[in-house]
Amino acid sequence: MAEDNKDQKTEDPSSKRISDSQEKGNFAHSREINSSFILLAALTGFMSLGEQSARDVMSAWTTSIVEAGTLQLTSEELFKVIVTSMKDFLKIIGPFLFLIMLGGIGSNIVQIGGLRFSTHPLIPKFNKLNPLTGFGRIFSKNTLMELFKSLFKVGIISVVSYYTIKSHWTEIPGLMGFGVGQSLSFMGQVALEIIFYVLLIMIFLSLIDFAFQRFTYHENLRMTKQEVKEERKETDGNPQIKQRIRTVQMEMARKRMMSAVPDADVIVTNPTHISIAIKYDPNNSSAPLVVAKGVGPIAMRIREIAKENGVPLVEDKPLARALNKTVEVGQLIPSSLYKAVAEILAYVYKLKHHS
C-alpha cells in the first residue's frame, strides 16, 4: 500500500505544503554540512588561538607543579584548586567551544535560510514510546544510511590521520629532545594538517549529501492529485460553498434593489427586456440616481412592483439601453445622459401635476 501511495504522488509539493512542513521544524538538512562548519570553526580556532592556548596550558601546568609541594589537603585548599582548575579549563577551551557553537548555528542558517524556530518538535509524541516503533526506526533505511555515512567518515579520518602522521614519522623520534612546548607545537601542527585535509573532503561530501537531502525532502513532500484538489479547496474555499454564498449575496442585493423601486420617480423601459428605475432628490444628490435595474425576469418584476405602487413607466429604448450599459445600481446618471433623463422626469412631473 505504501508503494501504491508513493506511485500516486505525481505532483510537485505546493508552497503551502512546504511552508507547513517547515513550520513543524522539517527542513532539507545535511549533518555533513554541520560537521564541515564545525571542522572549519575548529580549524579557525586552532590557527588563531592555538599558540595562546598552548601557552595557557603550559602556564597552568607550571603553576600546578610549583604549588603541588605547598598544597595542604584541606577542604578549603581542595576547593580553591578545583575552582582554579575550572577557570583555567574554561579559559583554554571556552573560545574553541564558542567558535564551534557559531559554526553549528551558521551551518543551520545556511541550510534553512535564516533563524527559524518551531515548538512542534518539542511536543511529546507518545507513539515513540512504542518499542516496536523504536526498533523499526533503529533498523530503518535512513538509520542504516546514517550508520554507513558515520563509518565512512571514521574511515576517512583514520586514513587521513594515518598518512598525515606517516609523512611526519621521521620527525617523531626527534621529539625526545624537545621541551613540552615544542612537543605541543608539533602536535598542534599535525592536528591542523589532519583537520584541514579532512575538511576538504567533508566539504565535497557535504555538498553531495545536501543535494541528496533536498531531493529526498521534496520527494517526501510530493502530493497526489487528490491532495492538490483538497488543498485548493482549503486555500480558495469550496467552490460549491462559494457559489452558494454568491447566490445568497445576489439575492439579498436584489431584494434591497426591489425595495427601492416603490420610491422611484420613473421606470425607463425597453419594452422587450430592460427596466431602469430612476429617482431624483435635489436635496440629497446633484443628479438623478439609478436605484434599480434589470434584464429579463428581473425587469418584469421591477415593472410589476412599479405598477403596484403607482410609479410611472416610460418607454425609451435608446435611453434604457444606454443606462443599462453605462450605469450601475446606486450610481448617478452621467452628464451625457442628463438631457434625456431630465426630459423624462419633466414629463413625469407634469403628469403628476395634472393628475
Image (tube, rainbow, N blue to C red):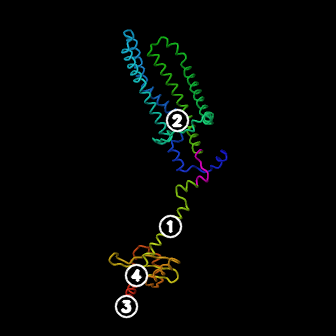
* Nearest-to-viewer mark from 2 and 1: 1
What is the quadrant of the C terminus in the image?
A: bottom left
Magenta range: 220-228
First of labels 3, 2 by sequence position: 2
Q: Is residue 76 left or right of residue 116?
A: left
Question: What residue is disc 2 on?
Answer: 33
Say which mark, if any, is on residue 248: 1
Q: Is residue 182 above or below residue 35?
A: above
Q: CA distance from mark 3 to mark 1?
A: 43 Å
Q: CA distance from mark 1 to mark 4?
A: 29 Å
* Numbered disc 4: secondary structure: loop
Q: CA distance from mark 2 to mark 1?
A: 57 Å
Residue at the far left: name it: 283
Q: Position of residue 151 (x, y in %)?
A: 60, 28
Asked if residue 143 shows in the view, the reply is no
Q: Nearer the viewer, mark 4 or mark 2?
A: 4
Q: Mark 1 or mark 4, which is nearer to you?
A: 1
SS category of the residue bearing label 3: helix
Q: Nearer the viewer, residue 274 or 252?
A: 252
The quadrant holding residue 219 is top right
Judged from this view, the residue extending furthest toward the top is 69
Helix, strand, or loop for circle 1?
helix
The residue tagged 3 is: 354
Residue at 49%, 19% (x, y): give it: 187
